[in-house]
Amino acid sequence: MKSIQLKHDRYRKARGGYSRLLELHCDHCGHVIALYQKDGPGSLKRMYIDRIVSPEHFAKLQHLSIKQVPNLICPHCKRLIGIPYIYEKEKRPAFRLFEGSVTKKIAKANG
């Protein structure tokens, strides 16, 4: 498995410089949905699209308008996990996660 470098940018700095890599699973079926860089403390209410490390197809979503970004759906059980929106405070595209839709596990990263 190749090593994953965490992003060091103004968003990470704004949240105290603390980041971790989370493996997100569908709470319904347990299927892995994404590997995600969570910056700062607190619960996971939204997933910024530019912080999704894998699967690879999420990287392409960064270049679409928010109207073109599809809903976040579990690829295994087809359950709706989150909906795309612009987080107004930072003008960043993200998925608003439904409460209790994912479970998370801390994954290993470098950086």
Image (tube, grey):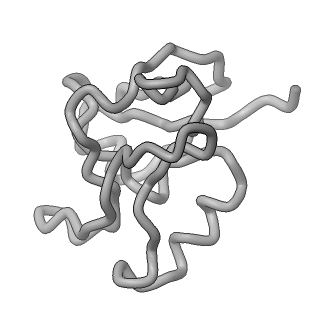
Quadrant assignment for the C terminus: top right
Residue at (51%, 26%) from the top-left corner? 25
Residue at (42%, 28%) from the top-left corner? 19
The x, y position of residue 85, in whole percent, is 26, 67
Observer-nearest of 22 and 32 = 32
Is 7 rendered above or below residue 84?
above
Observer-nearest of 15 and 78 = 78
Q: Answer with left or right where residue 94 lies relative to residue 98.
A: right
Quadrant assignment for the N terminus: top right
Q: Is residue 82 visible?
A: yes
Task: Single out the residue that lies furthest toward the left.
Answer: 89
The x, y position of residue 4, in whole percent, is 71, 34
Query: Could you tell me how many numbered marks the image carries?
Result: 0
Is 88 rendered above or below residue 45?
below
Q: Quadrant of residue 76?
A: top right
Q: Answer with left or right where residue 109 lies relative to residue 50.
A: right
The x, y position of residue 70, in whole percent, is 46, 69
Q: Answer with left or right where residue 38 lies relative to residue 40.
A: right
Q: Quadrant of residue 16?
A: top left
Q: Quadrant of residue 17?
A: top left
Residue at (28%, 44%) from the top-left corner? 97
Observer-nearest of 23 and 11 = 23
Residue at (63%, 71%) from the top-left corner? 60
The x, y position of residue 82, in whole percent, is 33, 50
Q: Is residue 21 visible?
A: no
Task: Single out the residue that lies furthest toward the right.
Answer: 1
